[in-house]
Amino acid sequence: MLVSSNHEIQGSRVVREIGRISAATGWGGVASASSEELRAQALRRLIAKAQDYEADAIVDVDYSVDGIKSCDLSACDLKRVIVSGVAVRLARG
């Protein structure tokens, strides 16, 4: 699966946008995993969703972090990483 943070895939041409898709990690403590691990987990989930739609690539990929302050102690704070993008089909040839 090809992935790009802009609307282009180098060396390929987008011929059809399937639609915007998104995926998220589960909620976890702020110290439970590194941001890089959470981004990788969210991206794997996004790729699986794109494959379900038979996409060739995902463009306009963007990450965000969602958080909840669940109590007065910082150890109770929760976060998750959300990733979204546009599933696309590429020209064959």
Image (cartoon, grey):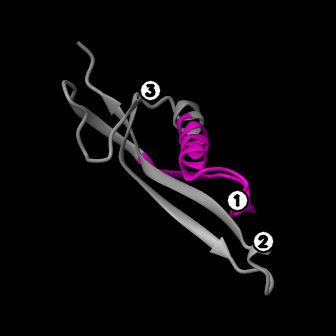
* Residue toward you, 15 or 12: 12
Is label 2 in a helix, a strand or a loop?
A: helix
The span shown in magenta is 19-47
Which residue corresponds to the image point at 44% horizontal and 26% vertical from the top-left?
A: 1
* Residue toward you, 86 or 67: 67
Instruction: Give the image location of residue 56, x and y in percent.
Output: 40, 28
Which residue corresponds to the image point at 53% horizontal and 42% vertical from the top-left?
A: 43
Is label 1 in a helix, a strand or a loop?
A: loop
| Structural crowding at the residue carrying mark 2, measured as other residues with C-alpha within 10 Å and reported as few (<14), some (14–19) or many (≥20) | few
Between disc 3 and disc 1, the foreground one is 1
Instruction: Give the image location of residue 52, x and y in percent.
Output: 59, 33
Is tag 1's residue or tag 2's residue first in the polypeptide sequence?
A: 1
3D distance between C-alphas at marks 1 and 2: 8 Å
3D distance between C-alphas at marks 3 and 1: 30 Å
| Structural crowding at the residue carrying mark 3, measured as other residues with C-alpha within 10 Å and reported as few (<14), some (14–19) or many (≥20) | few
The image quarter containing residue 17 is: top left
Which residue corresponds to the image point at 33% horizontal and 40% vertical from the top-left?
A: 4
Is tag 3's residue or tag 1's residue first in the polypeptide sequence?
A: 3
Look at label 2 and name its amino acid.
Answer: Ala
* Residue toward you, 41 or 59: 41
| Structural crowding at the residue carrying mark 1, measured as other residues with C-alpha within 10 Å and reported as few (<14), some (14–19) or many (≥20) | few
The image quarter containing residue 67 is: bottom right
Q: Is residue 40 magenta?
A: yes
Residue 31's disc number = 1
Mark 2 lies on residue: 75
Is tag 3's residue or tag 2's residue first in the polypeptide sequence?
A: 3
Q: Quadrant of the C terminus?
A: top left
Left or right, 63 with reference to 46? left
Instruction: Give the image location of residue 6, x and y in percent.
Output: 26, 47
Mark 3 lies on residue: 1
Residue 87's disc number = none
